[in-house]
């Protein structure tokens, strides 16, 4: 391992259920109601890509970028209001990797301002060399684009990168990029199929960086 890459939602902060509720509220304004099973398919995808699917499916007179921005504004307000904490074990893992001299990045489907907001809110920004958003790329997870670009920016070969993911779309993206993938079975991310991951952990504290 020469670099460690974190997904954010469901890995650093437990926001997958919050995202779902916010999106439900936005879509409900157009009388569109989405089941939990449908939402599981979208976990890990960029919100603009998700809204674009609904706009096309229901012929909505909306802009996906604006809907995504509305979602992320509401999310940031929620994080502050509820004083959300990092997922258990994630900050010690980041600090241990830092002590070991392993360069780190966040590669998330969230918007760039939200990634920076969360990293700043948890006082972990300085640990990361790169913060990359899938919203800035033509193809969202499960495409490997975000992970390939992250490796390039870290100047590390994809095969030397370890990724921590909580969703089926994220694990597909990581493995398609040729990276080693740790699947985090976060129950709040829904019943995600993490079978493509190289290993699966139920707790962040189960990750032993000396074995990577």
Image: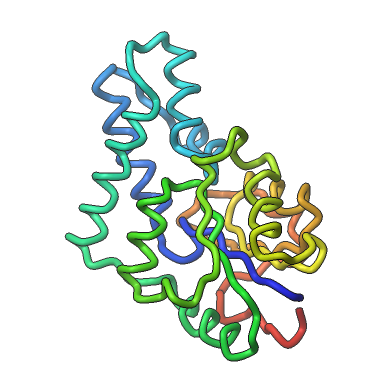
**Residue found farthest to the left:** 81
From the top left corner, tell me how far across and down residue 98 is, in percent: 57, 84
Nearer to us in this view, 70 or 38? 70
Using the image as rendered, state which of residue 120 and residue 197 is in the foreground: 120
Residue 206 in the image: above or below residue 84: below
Question: Which residue appears at 49% of the width and 59% of the height?
Answer: 8
Residue found at x 41% / y 56%: 115
Which residue: 67% across, 44% down? 145
Please state the horizontal and vertical placement of residue 154, each as a whole percent of the image: 66, 65
Horizontal arrangement in the rendering, residue 130 relative to residue 144 (left or right): left
Indicate whether 78 appears above or below 100.
Answer: above
Give the answer, above or below, for where 98 lies relative to 34: below
Which quadrant would residue 26 be assigned to in this image? top left
Q: Quadrant of the C terminus?
A: bottom right
Residue 196 horizontal side relative to residue 23, left or right: right
In the rendered image, the vertical position of residue 93 relative to residue 17, given as above or below:
below
Q: Position of residue 174 (x, y in %)?
A: 71, 53
Q: Nearer the viewer, residue 11 or 17?
A: 11
């Amino acid at each position: 391992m020469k670099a460690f890459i974190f997904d954010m939602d469901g890995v650093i902060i437990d926001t997958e259920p919050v995202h779902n509720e916010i999106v439900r509220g936005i879509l409900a304004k157009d009388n569109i109601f989405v089941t939990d099973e449908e939402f599981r398919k979208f976990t890990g995808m960029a919100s603009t890509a998700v809204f674009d699917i609904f706009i096309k499916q229901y012929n909505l007179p909306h802009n996906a970028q604006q809907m995504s921005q509305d979602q992320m504004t509401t999310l940031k307000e929620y994080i502050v209001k509820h004083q959300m904490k990092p997922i258990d074990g994630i900050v010690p893992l980041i600090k241990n990797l830092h002590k070991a001299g392993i360069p780190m990045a966040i590669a998330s489907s969230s918007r760039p301002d939200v990634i920076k907001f969360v990293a700043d809110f948890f006082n972990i920004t300085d640990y990361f060399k790169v913060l990359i958003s899938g919203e800035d790329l033509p193809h969202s997870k499960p495409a490997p684009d975000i992970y390939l670009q992250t490796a390039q920016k870290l100047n590390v070969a994809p095969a030397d990168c370890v990724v921590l993911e909580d969703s089926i779309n994220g694990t597909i993206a990581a493995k398609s990029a040729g990276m080693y993938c740790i699947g985090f079975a976060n129950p709040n991310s829904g019943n995600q199929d993490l079978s493509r991951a190289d290993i699966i952990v139920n707790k962040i504290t189960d990750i032993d960086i000396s074995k990577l």
